[in-house]
Image (spheres, rainbow, N blue to C red):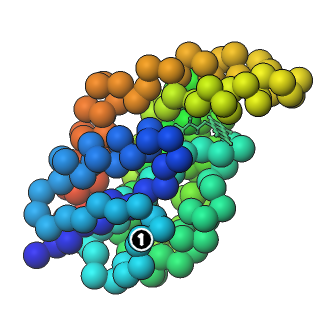
Amino acid sequence: MPKTLVTYFSQTGNTKKIAEAIFEALEGEKTIQPIDETRQLEEYNLIFIGFPVHSHSVPLKIQDFIKNIPENKKIAFFSTHGSLTGSRLSREALEHAVILAAKAKVLGTFSCRGRVSLEALEVFKKSPEHEAWAEMAASAASHPDERDLEDGKSFSKWITTLSRQP
Ligand SMILES: Cc1cc2nc3c(=O)[nH]c(=O)nc-3n(C[C@H](O)[C@H](O)[C@H](O)COP(=O)(O)O)c2cc1C
């Protein structure tokens, strides 16, 4: 029986919401857990790995995790970000994750916007370099929304279908 793992890092809950949507749409034997509790990967046929974009990139603890994924393991990435959907900034981190996972089989990626905490927005607004970004990122406040969660579920089903192909 194929086993699927959904593992994620989430500081303020946005990525966790997407992880739960992906998990809900999965059939068969499945596990969901924070990345800090994830040890054994060998037993899973498919692994979804989620993270928030930090400083345009993959948080360091996720980078370390990705580097240790067993060779040829089927995986998929999902992320949440404050930047506008489809913007270069929103894509960069996932592209980086795929490069880091060169030895695994990356079946696909998914991302959506996620509310940036007020504390973080305040910090960014005070930096001239990030002020404009912070103003734009404030519009992510309603995300992830119902549509994002539905998209996450569709992604989950699509990746599962792909994972069953030889
Ligand atoms: C320290 C920090 C750095 C961030 N850097 C970026 C960034 O470079 N690009 C971006 O789109 N969002 C950035 N964000 C916004 C988060 O990626 C976004 O709010 C995400 O949904 C948070 O997910 P979480 O609730 O799972 O932690 C940053 C947030 C924090 C707190």
Residue nearer the viewer, 158 or 38: 38
User: Which residue is denoted by mark 1 in the rendering?
Assistant: 37
Q: Tell me the residue at 41%/61% (across/down).
A: 34
Asked if residue 131 lies left or right of residue 18, the reply is right
Q: In the picture, which quadrant includes the N terminus? A: bottom left
Asked if residue 21 lies left or right of residue 122, the reply is left
Quick check: can you spot residue 39? Answer: yes
Residue nearer the viewer, 72 or 7: 7
Q: How far across and down, in percent of the image, does residue 60 sit?
A: 66, 62
Q: In the picture, which quadrant includes the C terminus? A: bottom left
Residue nearer the viewer, 117 or 132: 117
Note whether 157 is above or below 66 in the view shown: above
Q: How far across and down, in percent of the image, does residue 33 sit?
A: 34, 62
- Are there few (<14), some (14-19), or many (20+) residues within 10 Å of tag 1? few
Mark 1 lies within 8 Å of ligand 1 (Cβ measured)? no
Note whether 111 is above or below 128 in the view shown: below
Q: How far across and down, in percent of the image, does residue 62 sit?
A: 56, 62
**Label 1 element class:** helix
* Number of residue marks: 1
Asked if residue 41 lies left or right of residue 136, the reply is left
The picture quadrant where one finds residue 151 is top left
Quick check: can you spot residue 82? Answer: no
Asked if residue 22 lies left or right of residue 141, the reply is left
The picture quadrant where one finds residue 67 is bottom right
Q: How far across and down, in percent of the image, does residue 127 sit?
A: 86, 27
Q: Tell me the residue at 48%/68% (across/down).
A: 36
The picture quadrant where one finds residue 46 is bottom left
Q: Tell me the residue at 58%/31% (across/down).
A: 117
Q: Quadrant of ligand 1?
A: top right
Query: Mark 1: which amino acid?
Result: Glu
Q: Tell me the residue at 54%/71% (across/down).
A: 65
